Image (cartoon, grey):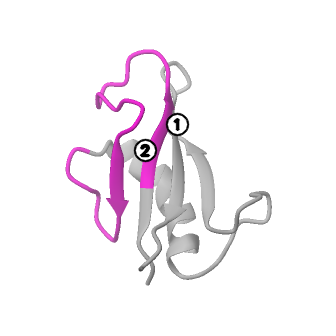
Amino acid sequence: MREVIAKVISQKGNCVAAHKVGDEFIIGQTTPAGFCSWAFYTLFPFAQVLQFGGSLPWEADANKAIVACPDPASPVVFELMVRSKE
């Protein structure tokens, strides 16, 4: 299984989890400490695809995905990316 990082690339309004641009979390099989559970539930299916070597056909880079949290009033947008094991 590959390691996937969720990085906040955009945040508008008032995020109740206090996520801000630049925050990074390692996505595994459990919710990372301090990570909004609603955002995790939304990101998890996409992260699983990347973790197990798949890709999303609408993304230009097979090792990345852009996913937004479900709060339309204060959206947080995450970039999921496979961390290279160098």
Label pair 1/2, CB-CB below 8 angstroms: yes
Front residue (pair 40, 50): 50
Answer left or right for 55 relative to 21.
right
Which disc number belongs to residue 86? none
Residue name at image x 37 percent, y 29 percent: 20
Question: Does the stretch in magenta take in 38?
Answer: no
Magenta stretch: dominant SS?
loop
The location of residue 43, given as percent across then percent down, is: 49, 54
Residue topped by disc 1: 70
Q: Secondary structure at mark 1?
A: loop
Answer left or right for 43 relative to 15.
right
Q: Amino acid at mark 2?
A: Ala
The location of residue 23, given as percent across then percent down, is: 35, 40
Question: In the rendered view of the protein, which quadrant contains the C terminus?
Answer: bottom left
Earlier-in-chain disc, 1 versus 2: 2
Furthest residue toward left: 33
Q: Is residue 31 above or below residue 83?
A: above
Q: Amino acid at mark 1?
A: Pro
Inter-mark Cα distance, 1 to 2: 7 Å
Q: Quadrant of residue 50?
A: bottom right
Question: In the rendered view of the protein, which quadrant contains the N terminus?
Answer: bottom left
Residue topped by disc 2: 39
Q: Secondary structure at mark 2?
A: helix
Q: Quadrant of residue 34?
A: top left
Residue name at image x 42 percent, y 79 percent: 85
Label 1 packing within 10 angstroms: few (<14), some (14-19), many (20+)? some
**Where does the magenta region start and end?**
6-34
